Image (cartoon, helix red, strand yellow):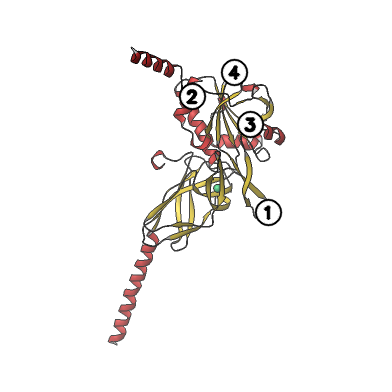
Amino acid sequence: MKIRTVLYLLLFISGIIVAQQNKNQSSKIEIKEAWIRVAAQGANTALFFEVVNNSDKPDTLLAAESELAEVVEVHETFKRENDMMGMRKVNFVVIPPRSTVKFKPRDLHVMLIKLKSDLKVGEKSEATLVFKNAGKLKAGAVVRDMQMMMNK
Amino acid sequence: MHKVLINCLLIFWLLTGCGNDFPVIEDLGSSNYQLTNQIEKEVQFPDFVKGKTVIAGYIFTNCPDICPLTTNNMRLIQERLKKENVKNVQFVSISFDPENDTPEVLKKFAEVRNLDLSNWTFLTGDKPVVDKLMKHVGVVAVPGDSTVFPSGKVTYYYIHTDRIQLIDGEGRIRKNYPGSSINVDEIIEDIKSL
Ligand SMILES: [Cu+2]
């Protein structure tokens, strides 16, 4: 009888610990400053944000999801010689431990391809970012025509 | 005495705009390209903007990053000129992807951004004409990465010259800038001293 009580107690405590760990796990990756560039229905646009990794382990952004567009992909803008610029799909982005990776204009972005409706300045939406360890994280994003000066 | 002379020369040199020399990069003045604006009106470029200083940007609207930055930078330049009461400047955004960028698409691109089109025109045209113009102005656009839609349709993203140009009243290109990262102060000064 006594042993059984102790076992239950242990089970209960370990449950709390696991729950606590899960909670920490999800707050180890933070999404900040999310915004979407203004664009018209049928066009393409980009979602920008900062990923903060507060943990001692790297994590990897694998994909992104959004209701706004027909296709959603992780992309990067690149520079070529003679002022040429291009853009390509990337399959994953590693977020090193204790660091911040900025998805910003002329750099990494989540590409929203073929928008289902107009996105006007001031409108708000939500996107989901899929990480290898942290899982799916939601980010609220506001529509803007340019990046705020302070996070340039 | 020598020092005074040198100083005088230096001041003269600065006043006459030593660093502000705008060599003619390309002369479009004797050519004409028949293009269509965002309200489906045919225009002859650069004829229809002759006599005005022209700020030209080169874009394709499927572009999510560089071309919207270029467009937004043109908006910032337009706002600055308005504030500083600089007149006789015309803005022109020309698409190098006429197959996708119909007048209607360009109109929507401008409208959703709330752009002031009182002195800003968006242009597209027949592909051979556009291709010829791009060659003339030195803008290169080659298809790069693509997206395949569930329907099977494919959209190509251009690798392209990131460009805003300063064109004088006679249709001569006088300076090139990186469109997406242009220094607004620099071009404002250039417009004033051209
Ligand atoms: Cu992209």
Q: Amino acid at mark 2?
A: Asp
Residue picked out by circle 2: B190
On whether disc 4 and disc 1 are found on a single subunit, the reply is yes
On whether disc 3 and disc 1 are found on a single subunit, the reply is yes
Cα separation between marks 4 and 1: 47 Å
Q: Amino acid at mark 1?
A: Gly
Q: Is residue B127 above or below residue B166?
A: below
Q: Amino acid at mark 4?
A: Gly
Element carrying mark 4: loop
| Chain letter of disc 3 in the image | B
Q: Nearer the viewer, mark 4 or mark 3?
A: 4
Q: Is residue A113 above or below residue B136?
A: below
Residue A76's x, y, as percent? 52, 49
Residue A135 appears in the rendering: yes
Residue B185 lies in quadrant: top left
Count residues near mark 1 (Cα–Cα under 10 Å), then give few for <14, some for 14-19, many for 20+: few
Count residues near mark 2 (Cα–Cα under 10 Å), then give few for <14, some for 14-19, many for 20+: some
Q: Amino acid at mark 3?
A: Leu
Residue picked out by circle 3: B123
Cα separation between marks 2 and 4: 17 Å
Element carrying mark 1: loop
Label disc, if present, on residue B51 of the rendered structure: 4
Cα separation between marks 3 and 1: 29 Å
On whether disc 2 and disc 4 are found on a single subunit, the reply is yes
| Chain letter of disc 1 in the image | B
